[in-house]
Amino acid sequence: MTFEQTLIDRLAPHAVADIRDDIPAALARISVVEGAHWRPNALDLYFPGLPAGDRAALVAALETAPRATPPHNPTRLQALRDSFDALGIDAFLIPQASEHRTRDLPEYAKRLEWVTGFTGSAGTAVIERTAAWLFVDGRYVLQAAQEVDPALIESRHFQRPSTWTFLKDSLPDGTRVGYDTWLHTPQEILSIQKELTGTSLSLVPLDGNPIDRLWRDRPPRPFSAVVAHPMERAGMSSDDKRTAMAADLKTASAGKMVLTQLESIAWAFNIRAGDTAFTPVVESYAIIHDDGHADLFIEQGKLTADVARALGNKTSLHDMSAFGGVLEELGRKKDTVAIDLGRTPKWVEDHLVGAGARVVHVVDPTEVARLIKNDAELDGFREAMARDGAAMVRFMRWLSEYPLDAPLTELMIAEKVTACRAQDPTFRGLSFPPIVGSGPNGAVIHYHPRPGSDRAVNPGDVIVLDSGGQYLSGTTDITRTFGRGPVGDFERSVITGVLSCHAALASARFPQGATGSQLDGIARAKLWSMGIEYDHGTGHGIGSFLSVHEGDIRISREGRKALSPGNVLSNEPGAYLAERFGVRHENTVIVREGQPGVTGEMFLELETISAAPFQRELINVQDLSPEHLAWLDDYHAFVLRLLTPYLDGPDLTWLHDATLPLSRSA
């Protein structure tokens, strides 16, 4: 990006010493930060005392700066292959991952997209000398087919057959598969090595990533200001969190534990920032000690004096560049160091073991603690859902009143729902880019409209809108299915069937110890009776002003973990008819204790906390069971009750009409 020299000259006297010699590079780091709230705070760190007029001009310039990755270039694939001989490999693994194992990647880490053109949040490519494959889950099968050139890369479902079952039959004998040790966990590498047992295929760890050397216009690392997450929102001090973690380390006979996942660090230290587009985290590493002290490796220019003080005297601050050296020092001391095999880069394990440390494997204790929200976090979720629900009502009224003969596109819908959320003073950005699929695009489970693919929404189209926000009190994720005017009878029957599935799960009662896989069948039963299946999980964990996809708690076939009171998850069954339309209904729920069973054992239930009406014109009331109809009427009464303090005027009048009992029309 470029800035007028006159603006640079005005900025120079106010710039901190670290950036004074290259102000454009510093501004470029802020330009890749998303969110109107994060960029101005970062400017204040780089340019303290900047006059208000210059600050406003700079904020405006950053708002219009291009931040997207340049269009995919097919020559990149061959350039990568040309590097294989020097690296001593015949193929290369490219996961959709960063060194911090976050689902939400900063622009500079989107290597899979740069090579293949695929923009989904999950997937892995294997690039061989003469062939290439992209493996995705069911959410992205149709999207991959649209985004990836089939003449260059074959897109495949990662379970049909499994990735390495397929590759063992497809890669030439003796293939040496290179991988970046920063982008894979020890658990992943061990799993692949087991798959390759008895074959002539082998894995080759690489020092550095060849894509980084080829990516000449690679975006810079982001620069955002760190803020403290206050006690009234966190519900537990950082010192108390680390004291509890220290007890876990003593149980494992480990003196220290390495954390590299950004959500874990943000939670453990009660800090938030804007280094990724949709998750309020800061790039960093941490080492937790068994006495509750900690080392935090972070770019210290991102910390105000107040935030540094809030971290306390039990936290030692280091530059990120010191991380490797500290790991080596732990090795020289023969320390026992804990890592989470499934969340820590292989690089960390290799570095520790190579330096002489004894490594033990411990599940990240923050992961376990984050899944069970405390009372302050649960209250924050309820507040965030109310604020988000009010935004959704403002959007839904706008959409319902939008003239059928006026042009309407998917991007217009995405921009409008974002603008409605941005009206809230506690809004800090989106929790993911809006999924807006109309007509056949709705059957692409995670379709995001973009210039060039944006579709006109026509009368009679079914529209899937999956969206969410980051608020100071919590993270939201909600999906509603709309019709632009009347829709067909078959579409209404499918929309109603999915709503029955949603109501069945929302009203479920289940014993303590029930797993997500057991609840998954409850949600799918009605659609199965209609001959319809959906290829994604029914629910995922949600973070507290953190990641919209959190942890390994889920309602799905793979949901092996038992649900517990305090878990916060989504409830989102769907139906997707390729080249026709899609449907999804999603609310956020809290797992809580219910009435005991007849013999006194604990039973659990789900508290629905998302608040927005379902479009009543799309519902075949006669197709809902009496129980599900009663649930829907009760839910709409809850929506009206919760949102009334947040709305007034025409918005509140519209909500009254949208939440009238449907049983009256049965």
Image: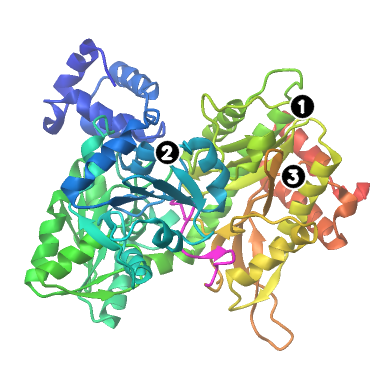
Q: Three-letter amino acid code at disc 1?
A: Pro
Secondary element at tag 2: loop
Residue 428 is left or right of residue 160, and the answer is: left
Which tag, 1 or 3, sits closer to the chain's start?
A: 1
Q: Nearer the viewer, mark 3 or mark 2?
A: 2
Q: x%, y% of residue 615?
A: 76, 41
State the mark number for residue 614: 3
Magenta stretch in the rendered image = 543-560
Tell me if residue 555 is in the magenta stretch: yes
State the mark number for residue 459: 1
Q: Three-letter amino acid code at disc 3?
A: Phe
Residue count near mark 1 (Cα–Cα under 10 Å), binned few <14, some 14–19, many ≥20: some
Quarter occupied by residue 16: top left
- How far apart are labels 1 and 2 at the CA level? 37 Å
Secondary element at tag 1: loop
Q: Tell me, yes or no, whether the two marked residues, 3 and 2, touch with CB atoms within 8 Å.
A: no
Quarter occupied by residue 348: bottom left
Q: x%, y% of residue 119?
A: 45, 40
Q: x%, y% of residue 211?
A: 26, 41
For the point 49% across and 46% down, the residue is: 155
Residue count near mark 3 (Cα–Cα under 10 Å), binned few <14, some 14–19, many ≥20: many
